[in-house]
Amino acid sequence: MKTKTTRALQGSAILATAGLLLSACGSSGGTDSGEQAGSTSFQGRGPITYVAGKDATGVVPKVIARWNALHPKEKVSFVQLPTDADSQRQQMIQNAETKSDAYTVLSLDVVWTSEFAAHQWIDRLPEQQFPLAKMLKPVVETARYRGGLYAAPASSDGGMLYYRTDLLKKAGITRPPVTWAEMTDDCAKVRKLPEAKDMSCYAGQLQKYEGLTVNFAEAVNSAGGTVTDAGGKPDVDTPEARAGLDFLAGAVKDGTIPREAVTYQEEEGRQAFQAGKLVFQRNWPYMYALAEKSKLAGKFAVAPLPGLNGPGSSSLGGHNLALSSFAKNKATALDFMKFFSSETSASTFLKDASLAPPYANLYDDPSLVKQYPYLPVLKQSILRAVPRPRVVSYGDVTSAIQQEAYAALTGSKSSAQALKDLQSDLQKSTAQ
C-alpha cells in the first residue's frame, strides 16, 4: 500500500546489459516521441522527477542511478514522500491542484487511478507501448479508467499470512490455519510453549490510515461481505460485514490481537514479528526479504490469509506509474515509465526487495519459485484479491472507513453501529 503502502514502497540496481535496458525503456535520442493518447502529446526531453513514498530498502535510488548513467541529459530526481499512503496522496493532490510541474512520474497506490484520472491530474497513456498482455489481468485493470490506460503497472501486492514454522511444528501443528478460528486455536497451543508464553497471536495494520482500510476490507470480504459493489454502491450494513468487523474488534478485545496493534502500520507489525512478539502477522511480500535477513531466517513461512469459513481474500495492493498532466519533458517521462515498469525491472525488484511483479510468467518460473518459495501463495493472493472501492471520491470513502473501523476496534462503538454509520457515510460520499 502498498498501501500500501504501505504498502511499501522497492528493488535494486538493474542487473542487465545496457543494450537490453535501452530496448526495454525505448529510445533515448533527442527527438520527441510524438505519440498521443487521447489529447496528450508526449513531447519534451530533459530532467524529470520520480515521486513515491519513502524507500525503506534504499534500492530505488540505485535503479534511478542506472537510468541516469544511461541518460545523462535526461536525469531523474527521486522525490521521497512520507511513508504512509494518506500523506503521499495528499501531497500529490496538492501538487496537482496548484498545477505545479515539480512532480513528473507519480507512484500511485493502485486504488487512486480512478480519482486522479477523473480529475485530469494524470495523462492517458498509449497502451500499445506497454506489454499489458504479459501481465496479470487484475493488475492491469487497476491502471484503467473508463476504458483508457492512465497508469503503467509497476508492482502488485497481495496480503499474506506470515507464521512461525518452528513454533507451530513444536506445538504439533502440521499446517497453517485456514480459518480465523483455527488461527486462534493454533495460537493457544503455541503459547503453551515456554518460549512463546509472552507472545501475542496476530496483528495486521490497524492504525487509522490506509492500512486500516485494507485490513477492514479484507476482513469483510473474507467473511463473505463487500464494501462496495462493482459499480461503487456501498453495502456494508450486512451480517457478513459485521462478522468480519466482529473478528477484528473481538480479537483486540480478548487479546488475540495485542492492543498496541491499533498503532501498527506495516513496519511496526514487521518489527514486532521479527522481534518474536507475534505468532502470525498479516503483511505484504516486501516483508519476506527483510525477515530472511533477520534472526527469523528459516523459521517462518507464508500462507493465504485465513477467513471466516475458509481461505480469505486480500485487498489488491501495488503501485502504478502515472504521468502528471502538468509535467514537462513528457517524452522522457514516458521512456522512464517503460524502463521502470519493464519485465527486467520487475524481475530485479522481485529478487532484491520481494516486490510482487505484474508479469504472470515470473510467478511460474521454477528457478524463481525455488529461490522465492512464497511466489505461488502470492500469485493466488493477487488472483483472489478484491480491489478496494474504485470510486472517484476515494479520499472521502477511505476516511469514513478508517473512522468507523477504528471506533469499533477501540470499543467506542459496536460493530453494528459502526457499520450502520459507515453505510450512511459511504452513501453520501459516493453520491457526490
Image (cartoon, rainbow, N blue to C red):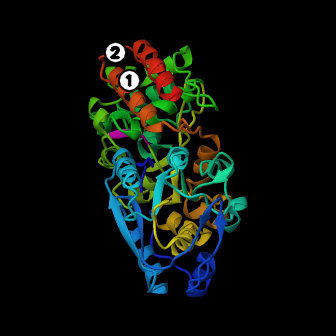
- At x 43%, y 74%, the residue is 64
Q: Quadrant of residue 194?
A: top left
Disc number placed over residue 404 in the picture, else none: 1
Disc number placed over residue 413 in the picture, else none: 2
Tell me which amino acid carries mark 1: Glu
Magenta-drawn segment: 278-282
Q: In the rendered structure, are the residues bearing label 1 and label 2 in contact, judged by CB atoms less than 8 Å apart? A: yes
Crowding around mark 1 (Cα neighbors within 10 Å: few <14, some 14 to 19, many 20+) is: many
Which element is circle 2 on? Answer: loop
Which element is circle 1 on? Answer: helix
Mark 1 vs mark 2: which is more N-terminal?
A: 1
Q: Quadrant of residue 103?
A: bottom left
Q: Position of residue 208 (x, y in %)?
A: 33, 34
The residue closer to the viewer here, 56 or 178, is: 56
Crowding around mark 2 (Cα neighbors within 10 Å: few <14, some 14 to 19, many 20+) is: some
Alpha carbons under labels 1 and 2: distance apart: 8 Å
- At x 57%, y 68%, the residue is 347
